[in-house]
Image: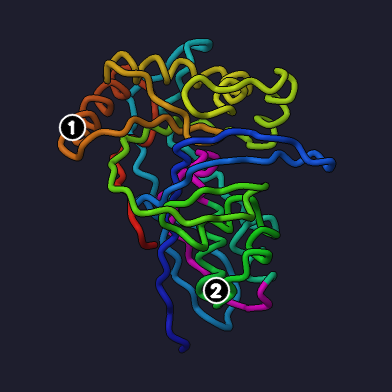
């Protein structure tokens, strides 16, 4: 039996994002700061075989009831894994791109549609496993994939294909990801429709994301009431985050988990540290 390789696929946190232009083909040009954090999926890759298995290991905080419609909460029923299993899956696409066959067991700990680059980091992990580090190849799989191949901390520009490494910065972020999926293309369309607003908190896409998924505002206000500070949206959503020192972060995670349960809602609530490695 061929050996099974174990590869980590670390999430990325977009700490700042400005939309600086729109190309003739409609793609938006960015200037963003991204950093690798230690929340990670794990891939078990068996070379030469076939198949994809996705195991949902997202550490959801579950309430014991449900919120009425319109309050911005979500039912406490377990969240189905939103990761596609067919040819649109980024792991499958990455393998096809590099011309490799493998059976992959994907242990999913980064929620899909959370703005944390979960699918992109999975694709990047496959590219690193295959030794395919060409930025052009990575960009062909998605705007976040080139950064996820490089990792660390970087200034990302263009449509994501330009990655300029920056010095490592030690920080801890408290992440709150509601069980909501926010589609990035919808957010960019909303940003266009709103006239291209500048986000007041370092993220130009935040106003558009709240238009696309209004329940994000409820979560923002819940976090603000517990933390005493307004969180920032990570990229196109739907993760809110606050940076805190490690001890304060640990206390805040416990408080936020309690608030989520009290509201009979459902979210991933974790503290994640920056990392220079995958």
Is 112 contained in the magenta span? yes
Which segment is the magenta one?
A: 98-118
Q: How many marks?
A: 2
The percent coordinates of residue 121 (x first, y second) are 51, 56
Residue hosting label 1: 248
The percent coordinates of residue 79 (x first, y second) are 47, 37
On the picture, is 164 further left or further right than 90?
Answer: left
On the picture, is 57 further left or further right than 20?
Answer: left
User: Does residue 216 sit above or below 188 in this rendering?
Assistant: above
Identify the residue shown where x is 56% and y is 65%: 52
Near-viewer residue (146 or 112): 146
Residue hosting label 2: 103
* Residue furthest to the right: 24
Identify the residue shown where x is 84% and y is 41%: 24
* Residue furthest to the bottom: 1
Identify the residue shown where x is 56% and y is 17%: 214
Viewport quadrant of the C terminus: bottom left
* Comes first in the chain, label 1 or label 2: 2
Disc 1 crowd, CA 10 A, few/some/many (<14, 14-19, 20+): few
Answer with the quarter of the image where residue 199 lies: top right
Answer with the quarter of the image where residue 100 lies: bottom right
Near-viewer residue (24 or 108): 24
The percent coordinates of residue 245 (x first, y second) are 21, 36
**Tag nearer the camera, 1 or 2:** 1
Disc 2 crowd, CA 10 A, few/some/many (<14, 14-19, 20+): some
State yes or no: discs 1 and 2 in contact (Cβ < 8 Å). no
Give the structural element (helix, strand or loop) at label 1.
helix
Answer with the quarter of the image where residue 276 lies: bottom left
Q: Looking at the image, what colour scheme do you see?
A: rainbow
Is 9 contained in the magenta span? no
Q: CA distance from mark 1 to mark 2?
A: 41 Å
Identify the residue shown where x is 58% and y is 51%: 144
């Amino acid at each position: 039996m061929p050996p099974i390789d174990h590869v980590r696929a670390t999430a990325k946190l977009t700490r700042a994002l400005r939309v600086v232009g729109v190309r003739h083909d409609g793609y938006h040009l960015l200037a963003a700061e991204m950093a690798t954090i230690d929340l990670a999926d794990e891939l078990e890759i068996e070379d030469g075989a076939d198949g994809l298995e996705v195991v949902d290991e997202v550490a959801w905080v579950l309430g014991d009831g449900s919120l009425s419609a319109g309050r911005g909460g979500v039912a406490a029923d377990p969240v189905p894994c939103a990761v596609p299993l067919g040819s649109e899956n980024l792991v499958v696409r990455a393998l096809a791109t590099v011309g490799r066959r493998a059976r992959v067991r994907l242990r999913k700990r980064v929620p899909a549609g959370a703005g944390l680059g979960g699918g992109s980091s999975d694709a990047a992990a496959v590219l690193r496993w295959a030794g395919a580090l060409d930025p052009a190849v990575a960009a062909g799989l998605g705007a976040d994939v080139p950064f996820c191949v490089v990792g660390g901390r970087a200034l990302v520009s263009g449509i994501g294909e330009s990655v300029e490494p920056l010095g490592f910065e030690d920080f801890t972020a408290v992440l709150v990801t509601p069980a909501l999926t926010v589609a990035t293309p919808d957010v960019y369309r909303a940003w266009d429709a709103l006239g291209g607003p500048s986000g007041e908190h370092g993220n130009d896409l935040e106003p558009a994301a709240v238009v696309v998924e209004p329940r994000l505002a409820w979560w923002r206000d819940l976090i603000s009431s517990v933390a005493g500070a307004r969180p920032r949206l990570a990229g196109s959503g739907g993760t809110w985050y606050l940076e805190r020192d490690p001890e304060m972060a640990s206390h805040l995670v416990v408080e936020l988990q309690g608030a989520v349960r009290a509201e009979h809602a459902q979210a991933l609530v974790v503290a994640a540290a920056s990392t220079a490695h995958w």
